[in-house]
Image (tube, rainbow, N blue to C red):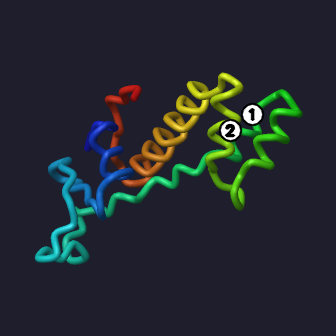
Amino acid sequence: MIVFFDELYGYMIFHAQGYFNTITGACTYDNEDFDYAHHPDYVPIPKINSDYAQGFISEITDKTLRRKLFSSLDNGSYSQAFHMIVTDNGLYSSWIDYVDNCDFEFAKKWCESNGIKCIGRQKV
């Protein structure tokens, strides 16, 4: 089965629980009147955890900037301070590319583990 990344990504990021039909290739919202547990052709679509700040920081070569970014995190997670440092240091587009790549890899791994081919990646 083949799924387009852009459609799947929308379900992983924005929607309430979604399901992928392994027979038709269609994505659908959760329907309270339908018992997905009794239909093995429907696979729950996971939510993307897009907190990639620590991974992004570890790729920064400037040690001073890396320390500033790590200290800006809120319990290890993305924060407004992190955003400001990234923006002020001209790294915003690199950050967006990093998140995009991580999201795609997450979706691709999920698809592979469910026997689904994920294609049609489009940069946001």
Distance of label 1 from label 2 (alpha carbons): 5 Å
Q: Residues within 10 Å of mark 2 (few under 14, many from 20)?
A: some
97 horizontally vs 53: left or right: left
Above or below, comparing residue 110 to residue 86 in the picture: below
**Image quarter of the C terminus:** top left
98 horizontally vs 27: left or right: right
Q: Residue 65: image x %, image y %?
A: 82, 33
The type of residue carrying mark 1 is Glu
- In the current view of this chain or complex, which residue is farthest to the left? 33
Above or below, comparing residue 88 to residue 107 in the picture: above
Residue sitting at x 46%, y 53% = 48
48 horizontally vs 30: left or right: right
Front in this rendered view, residue 24 or 123 = 123
**Image quarter of the N terminus:** top left
Residue bearing mark 2? 56
Residue sitting at x 18%, y 53% = 23
Front in this rendered view, residue 20 or 14 = 14
Q: Are marks 1 and 2 in contact (CB under 8 Å)?
A: yes
Residue bearing mark 1? 59
Q: Residue 120: image x %, image y %?
A: 32, 29
Local secondary structure at mark 2: helix
Front in this rendered view, residue 42 or 33 = 33
